[in-house]
Image (cartoon, coloured by chain):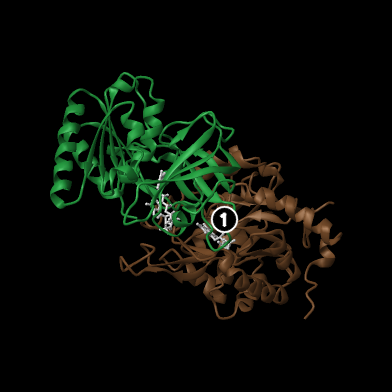
Chain colours: A green, B brown
């Protein structure tokens, strides 16, 4: 297993992606490479810039997008207090990082695998694609509301076939769901693997379809996190009784410790 | 410098140093083992234990606020038996005091829990949570009523054997000193304070509360001034040792609590700043004492000039 560490890493650069209404909301944050090299795509790190004062206490969780011999890359969307401040990080700034945390996505090199990404949920699939020994078994369906150049879609598309779906209306969304329905049915029929990451309503749709078609499906959950290591019990989700991982008390498992990736039939998604 | 802390009236009991971790913020200790040496801590107070497993409150149950956080975890835990079977044996309890934090719905249940823990070699002391704001069945009432607090203390003391009993007080009362005196008279060996302050947060866009439970417990640096005041008042009201808790994020903070009379402290929310926080704080505290030339903590403790 991987060994978790808590280290200060220097920012190499913080590259904005695309523009929305003249503003940058999406960033590839490149950090010096941490000492850990063992990690699984779908795992995440907790990030707290060293410059943060005590007005913001929690670190923020981000999927590991890529790890190269030179750097650790995170891909993030500026949505609130923390990530907006992270958007101002510059090269040379320092951030505290602990990880790699969580379990990561299943990887079965010979199994046809469908990756379903909603918006910023594309981040862990970059690492997944680049880590996969037989990328010809991978396919991606990517639903997004912001312009495509806001996301690292190209770095996936250069390795595998991916389809991007720009949603600007209800009809677009319905078409995307129909497409996912068809795809999930195909993968269920060939005993493939379906992996999903994105906002909770998106995951709920994928879960419903996967259960209907009996697909083997994993969902990467998003919850508010304080510690990232399983201690505060702030990030739990309801899990089925057959998930008897140790430390799971009374049907609720910590997403940071026992997830963020769960089998679709084992979790009940809760709004958070 | 030797920071061993001997507690008056409890000759057999000592913390290696005055920096402990607070219940609910350090899991069962094991979660933090990758980030530091647990045996360097003064003590580990584990997540609140109840007799039966508890599922806790619905999500969302934590929210960040300026300089603090709200939680309404609602004491999710897998029950005392599961803790003793699955977690305690993995903790280095011979080298670091492991303190069990307990919660129950009535004095008899508190006593039942305490009697189970009293038999456990690996448990150094029992901390009784009579102050949790997040559970519906009257948890807070024990902490808000001097007589009820005394009844729980007596019930636990009667069965605790030679395990020291620490009563953890709530700040959500009119006069904390009255409660402190009541639990001291009822036999408490130590008092820890404070638990979280009752608080709330809302979102103007979704028009929803930040927590599913609506109300939760506020912790973190935002509550430190309240905690200091409470510890100061309690230290003047009782003679048993007091453990200060609330918003500690630096070695200076630890000294502040000692200045108003605390024997030891517990670090809570700061463990979320970074998982090695408490381990580093132990070192920083030693460095600060050296820097300030404080050779005898006993001299310094309670020496506030008013
Ligand atoms: C395992 C995991 C992996 C993630 N990976 C990525 C990623 O690769 N890229 C990316 O852009 N985002 C990712 N997120 C979401 C990201 O953590 C949040 O967008 C971020 O915490 C929001 O912080 P904020 O201060 O800007 O928002 P605020 O809303 O101001 O922050 C308040 C708190 O709410 C929580 N929060 C708010 N929004 C979310 C959310 N959508 N998900 C989880 N917690 C939230 C955070 O814990 C935050 O501390 C991931 C979340 C999880 C749990
Ligand atoms: C997430 C969380 C869970 C907690 N759970 C418990 C608990 O189970 N039992 C208890 O006595 N106190 C519990 N507390 C209260 C803390 O132990 C501590 O008293 C309080 O947070 C104030 O200290 P701080 O400001 O350093 O966090 C919890 C606090 C937090 C933040
Ligand atoms: S974030 Fe603390 S338990 Fe998951």
* Residue B161 showing in the rendered view: no
**Residue sitting at 40 percent across and 41 percent down?**
A260
- In this orientation, does residue B14 appear? yes
Label 1 element class: loop
Percent of width and height locating residue A254: 43, 45
Q: Is mark 1 within 8 Å of ligand 2?
A: yes
Q: Is residue B156 placed above or below A147 in the rendered structure?
A: below
**In the rendered image of this protein, does residue A176 appear above or below residue B59?**
above
Residue A267: percent from left, percent from top: 31, 42
Nearer to me, A47 or A130: A130
Is B42 displayed left or right of A157 in the figure? right
- Name the image quarter holding residue A116: top left
Residue with the mark numbered 1: B23
Given residues A72 and B74, the one toward you in this image is A72
Quadrant occupied by the C terminus of chain B:
bottom right
Query: Could you say where residue A147 lies in the image, as x and y percent from the top left?
Result: 28, 47
Q: Residues within 10 Å of mark 1 (few under 14, many from 20)?
A: many
Q: Quadrant of ligand 2?
A: bottom right
Seen at 40% across and 66% down, the residue is: B136
Furthest-front residue in this view: A22
Chain assignment, label 1? B
């Amino acid at each position: 297993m991987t060994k978790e560490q808590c280290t200060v890493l220097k920012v190499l650069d913080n590259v904005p992606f695309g523009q929305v209404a003249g503003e940058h909301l999406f960033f590839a944050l490149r950090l010096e490479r941490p000492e850990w090299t063992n990690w699984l795509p779908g795992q995440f790190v907790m990030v707290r810039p060293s410059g943060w004062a005590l007005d913001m206490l929690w670190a923020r969780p981000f999927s590991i997008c890529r790890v190269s011999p030179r750097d650790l890359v995170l891909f993030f969307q500026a949505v609130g207090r923390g990530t907006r401040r992270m958007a101002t990080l510059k090269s040379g700034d320092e951030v505290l990082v602990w990880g790699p945390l969580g379990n990561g996505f299943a990887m079965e090199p010979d199994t046809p695998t469908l990756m379903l990404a909603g918006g910023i949920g594309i981040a862990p699939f970059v690492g997944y694609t680049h880590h996969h020994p037989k990328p010809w078994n991978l396919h991606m369906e990517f639903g997004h509301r912001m312009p495509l150049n806001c996301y690292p879609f190209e770095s996936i598309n250069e390795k595998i076939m991916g389809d991007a779906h720009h949603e600007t209306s209800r009809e677009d969304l319905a078409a995307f769901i129909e497409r996912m329905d068809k795809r999930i049915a195909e993968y269920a029929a060939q005993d493939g693997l379906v992996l999903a990451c994105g906002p909770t309503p998106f995951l709920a749709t994928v879960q419903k379809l996967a259960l209907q078609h009996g697909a083997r499906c994993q969902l990467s959950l998003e919850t508010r996190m304080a510690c990232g290591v399983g201690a505060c019990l702030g990030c739990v989700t309801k899990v089925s009784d057959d998930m008897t991982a140790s430390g799971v008390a009374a049907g609720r498992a910590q997403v940071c410790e026992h997830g963020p990736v769960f089998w679709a039939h084992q979790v009940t998604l809760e709004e958070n | 410098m030797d920071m061993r802390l001997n507690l008056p009236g409890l000759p057999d009991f000592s913390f290696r140093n005055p920096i402990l971790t607070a219940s609910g913020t350090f899991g069962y200790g094991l979660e933090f083992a990758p980030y530091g040496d647990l045996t360097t801590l003064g003590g580990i107070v584990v997540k609140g234990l109840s007799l039966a497993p508890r599922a806790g409150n619905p999500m969302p149950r934590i929210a960040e606020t300026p300089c603090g956080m709200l939680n309404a975890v609602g004491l999710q835990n897998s029950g005392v038996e599961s803790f003793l079977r699955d977690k305690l044996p993995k903790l280095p309890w011979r080298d670091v005091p492991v303190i069990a934090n307990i919660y129950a719905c009535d004095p008899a249940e508190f006593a039942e829990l305490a009697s189970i823990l009293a038999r456990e070699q690996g448990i150094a002391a029992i901390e009784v949570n009579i102050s949790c704001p997040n559970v519906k069945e009257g948890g807070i009432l024990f902490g808000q009523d001097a007589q009820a607090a005394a009844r729980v203390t007596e019930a636990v003391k009667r069965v605790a054997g030679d395990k020291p009993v620490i009563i953890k007080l709530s700040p959500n009362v009119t006069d904390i000193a009255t409660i402190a005196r009541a639990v001291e008279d009822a036999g408490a060996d130590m008092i820890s304070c404070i638990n979280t302050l009752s608080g709330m947060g809302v979102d103007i866009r979704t028009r929803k509360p930040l927590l599913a439970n609506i109300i939760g417990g506020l912790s973190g640096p935002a509550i430190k001034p309240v905690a200091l005041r409470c510890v100061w008042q309690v230290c003047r009201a009782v003679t048993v040792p007091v453990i200060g808790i609330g918003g500690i994020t630096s070695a200076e903070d630890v000294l502040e609590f000692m200045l108003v009379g605390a024997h030891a402290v517990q670090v809570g929310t700061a463990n979320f700043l970074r998982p090695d926080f408490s381990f580093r704080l132990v070192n920083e505290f030693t460095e600060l004492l050296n820097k300030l030339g404080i050779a005898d903590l006993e001299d310094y403790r309670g020496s506030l000039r008013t």
